[in-house]
Image (cartoon, rainbow, N blue to C red):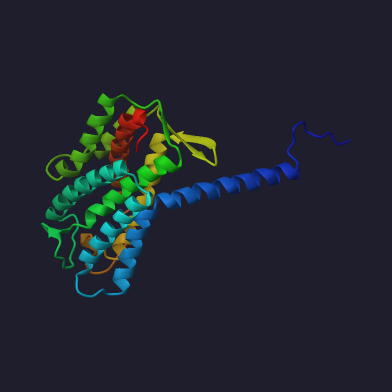
Amino acid sequence: MYLPIPNEPNDKTLKFRFLHSVRQLVGFGWEQALSCLFPVVIFASLAVTQLIPLPWLPRYDWLLIICLLMQAIMLKSGLETKDELKVITLFHIIGLALEIFKVHMGSWSYPEEGYFKIFGVPLYSGFMYASVASYLCQAWRRLNVDLIKWPPFLAVVPLAIAIYLNYFTHHFWVDIRWWLSGLVLVVFWKSWVSYEVNRIQYRMPIALSFVLIGFFIWIAENIATYFGAWKYPNQTEAWSLVHIGKVSSWVLLVIVSFLIVATLKQVKKKTGRM
């Protein structure tokens, strides 16, 4: 005799769970796509300007104009707030400073001509860093992100500064990225990030979110270098896949970005802005 197992899910229940999971996954993907609007425009512009030469100005300058126009459209349409624009501008400056140093050290190069260049770095390059901040700000608002057991300010800020400075100092001193990565795990061991999809709340360890975002930026980096956004020394003759080890660099950069945005969000939380 067959005895049914108590609470055994039937076909109808399994179907409902499957459709619910698909609905949530699609909803999450849609919100992510909207949050990535600025980066998508940048990648689309890289592809179009690579395939279709534009008149009058060098390619790098057209990319700068496109980025500025997109920034203005997002602000005017309400897709981006004034406070988010301030964060993005800060990241543009931080990224441009890093680009100038790295190009000077020969880490990569921008071989094409351009009128709007500073020490060999086109101004549009700062928007690639700003697009990461744009994504974080947009996703934070759209997914109603909240922080659980966030570390104290005195632990977060020095860690972010140390990670950023290591991008410069490792050229002259020991590269301590792996020590910093270990410190990140220690500082954020109990920290989680919560987010909502269709009014249902989920959460994941913050360290895992850093790795996931860093990995997808590495994929985006391969797309960007393929379309000539910049070139690494091993890509001067022909394009090749960016070494998987670069994921660690992007993860650390994501951490700096996340810490800055999170700190500003904490400061602005009571005002209802950002």
Q: Residue at x 24, y 30 (%)?
A: 157
Q: Residue at x 25, y 35 (%)?
A: 160
Specify the quadrant of the image occupied by residue 211.
top left
The answer to whether residue 105 is left or right of residue 32 is left
Q: How many marks?
A: 0
Question: Most extreme residue toward the right, as rendered?
Answer: 1
Q: Residue at x 31, y 60 (%)?
A: 224
Q: Nearer the viewer, residue 23 or 75?
A: 75
Instruction: Locate the C terminus and report the quarter of the image it occupies.
Output: top left
Instruction: Locate the N terminus and report the quarter of the image it occupies.
Output: top right
Q: Residue at x 13, y 53 (%)?
A: 105
Q: Nearer the viewer, residue 1 or 157?
A: 157
Where residue 176 sits in the image (x, y, percent)?
A: 22, 37
| Residue 80 visible at all | yes
Query: In this rendering, is residue 55 above or below 28?
Result: below
Where residue 102 sits in the image (x, y, percent)?
A: 16, 51
Where residue 91 sits in the image (x, y, percent)?
A: 24, 45
The answer to whether residue 249 is left or right of residue 174 is right
| Residue 252 visible at all | no
Question: Most extreme residue toward the front, as rendered?
Answer: 76
The answer to whether residue 165 is left or right of residue 30 is left
Where residue 228 sits in the image (x, y, percent)?
A: 27, 65
